Amino acid sequence: MEKVTKKDCPYYQAPRYYVNPETDEVVEGSAMCELVDKYCLKHYGQKCGIYDEEMDKQCR
């Protein structure tokens, strides 16, 4: 999968909610893109993007 930049991050484009898997904190808005970056770098080795359906559901 290609790496994408933050400006391409789909999580920036809608007011979604993201559950931080490390703290179970629910984050709203653009701050979650950074959390998604951290999560995806840790678990997938790359930055923002739609990685799988489960992650996509968490971010809606």
Image (spheres, rainbow, N blue to C red):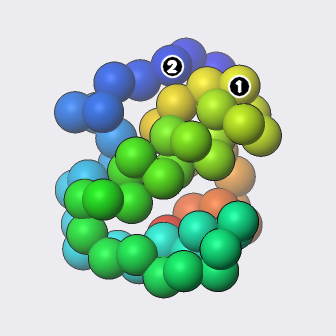
Q: Residue at x 22, y 33 (%)?
A: 7
Instruction: Name the residue located 41 percent from the left edge and 23 percent from the top edge.
Output: 4
Q: Position of residue 15 (x, y in %)?
A: 24, 74
The residue drawn where x is 54% and y is 80% is 25
Residue kind at label 2, given as amino acid type: Lys
User: For residue 55, what is the image quadrant?
Assistant: bottom right
Give the image quarter of residue 16: bottom left
Locate residue 46, reporting x and y percent: 61, 25
Residue that label 2 marks: 3
Residue that appears at 51% across and 50% down: 36
Image quarter of the C terminus: bottom left
Mark 2 packing: few (<14 Cα in 10 Å), some, or many (20+)? few
Q: First in sequence: mark 1 or mark 2?
A: 2
* The quadrant where residue 11 appears: bottom left
Residue sitting nearer the eye, 6 or 53: 6
Q: Tell me residue 34's x, y (percent).
A: 40, 46
Q: Amino acid at mark 1?
A: Gly
Q: Which mark is residue 45?
A: 1
